Image (tube, rainbow, N blue to C red):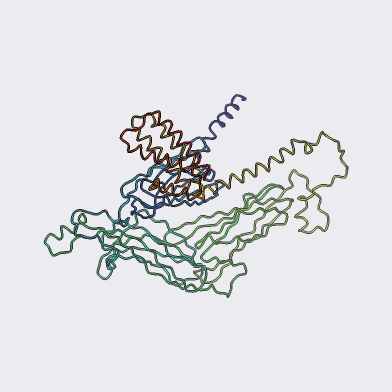
Amino acid sequence: MKRAFFCTAAMELVFSPIMFAQDLQISANVNSNRIALNQQFELTVELNGSDANRAPQPELPDLSQFAAFLGTSSSLNTQIVNSQISVTRIYSHHFVATREGRFQIPAIRLAYKGQTFATEPITVDIVPGQASSPPPTTVNPKRSQASDAEDLSNVLFLKAEANKRSVYQNEAVIVTYKIFTAVSVNSYGISQLPNMVGFWSEEFPTAQRPRIYDQVINGKQFKVAEIKKLALFPQSSGSKTLEPLTIDCEVQMPRRRSRDIFDSFFDDSFFGRTVRKTIQSDPITIDVLRLPEEGRPADFEGAVGSFTISAAVDKSQVQTNEPITLKLRISGNGNIKILAQPKIEFPTDFEVYDPKVSENIRRESDQIAGDKTFEYVIIPRFPGNQVIKPVAFSYFDLGSKSYERIATAALDISVAKGKENLAAIPMGTSKEDVKFIGQDIRYIQMRMPEFRKIGPEFYKTAPFFVIFIFKFIGLGGAMAYRQQLDRLSSNVAYARSRKANKMALKRLRRAQAQMRSDNARDFYSEVSKALMEFIGDKLNVPAAGLITEEVEKVLRARGISEDVVGEYIECLKACDFVRFAPAPPHNGKRQGFFEKAKKAIIELDKAI
């Protein structure tokens, strides 16, 4: 048994870091794989898992070859479901495209708890002009691409359909967005969601490929696709307007419009042209009726729809101080999420804890339905037959257009005396007094105990004060470390400046690896890159495009001593000279120059 115990403990010590480290996933994506030159784009890095909040920020690869860095923002989302913690941290990095061509964003890596996590590489195309336009074709230069100005309203439009235009407050309105098209739509994307101020919204799940069917309008046949479906619950009375939904479409249009006998051949989609078209739905006005005052129950909390209520305990016969679980469930059709917690009258002998609330929402057909459960833990403190009175719930019934009040059945609980002795209850004690007997002071000892000294007082010794002070020092250090991490994650300039020296020395090591190679220009090119990127990190500017004269001007403007600036600029000029010299220096001079560049970086880091 002892051998098995020690083996198990050893396995936990070895594998537990791996198990914890595995509770982390990393992924990356860009908002568009096709980007226009000089257009901004966003690279999102997402960490998922319970360790996402503790893991450091992943380090970005160098994208200066084709993009300029603008800034970073981050967000954190934590959810607790069934005692399981789910954490998502998102880092949004903003860039602007600076060079045309096809490029690859390398895998983004994160080292954490002895493991390395990596994303998949991402390929992006940077094109001239509009990002979504197709690349120029050489079939016929005289053919121009169509733009949004081309009128396609007769063959392509977006329509928003509401199943009701007059509803009560908090009654569901089902809004469906449909694309009607008599042309070929290659792809579409939602560019602007409607402003839903004044509505509580629930979105119906949609298939990855929407169902397409035919519909004839004014004698013309259209293909129809439902792209979005919402249930909207107006939160106040009056006239409400739902703003339009805007989408961008890629439309395949025939390239020729002539009377040539071969026109039908060239109308084939293979010879077509792509048009980018932005369409939007019309706004929808909904008249929201006020709920009637007549017959409104005093406990009405705004529920509208059709509901049922039930209550049950996991056991009806218990002993004192034994916990009981009471589940109160409200089910039906309507806005489940806003259902308020009903008021329950518990016996005064019961100790009651705050409920655990869970929701189960079903979005099917044209209805929002489900149930909301309130789970209480209650503990009877005294024996006897106890009754939990019926729990009432009021709602406005849409079928009868009137208020309904429903209630659960009473719950009888038989409480027997447990093993623990209970304090005697004096005659004439009120129910309010019973709540505290046995909880605050249960017994009064009449016999005075004998006190004796059991040893020296630890709180008077030096180790106690050392431990006491060390706690505050540790707390202060933890707070400073947390502030440092927050500053690094929110202030990009500060983060780049702090890491500049470390990154420069890392880049110099790459140059050192090239020191003994036959190609000396590679060595000086790596040193020059380390010097330039150190300046870019320190000053929070893109290293791409920096020239030696600009670096010298910026450093002198900051009031840095002439000796430090001179040494640094001399290294940069030496790199520029040697890279284009016909006969590069031998290895011995490279070693001396490497030490000189390293010293220049360290001295400049101290001066800035």
Q: Nearer the viewer, residue 178 or 596?
A: 596
Q: Nearer the viewer, residue 404 or 438?
A: 438
Furthest toward the left, the residue is 261
Q: Nearer the viewer, residue 467 or 310?
A: 467
Give the percent coordinates (x, y) of residue 61: 42, 43
Give the percent coordinates (x, y) of residue 351: 70, 53
Q: Give the left or right position of residue 447, taking residue 515 as reference.
A: right
Q: Residue at x 41, y 65 (%)?
A: 175
Give the percent coordinates (x, y) of residue 460: 79, 38
**Corner quadrant of residue 215:** bottom left
**Corner quadrant of residue 216:** bottom left
Q: Give the left or right position of residue 192, taking residue 143 as reference.
A: right
Quarter of the image with the N terminus in it: top right
Furthest toward the top, the residue is 3
Give the percent coordinates (x, y) of residue 522: 36, 35
All told, the count of numbered labels is 0
Furthest toward the front, the residue is 562
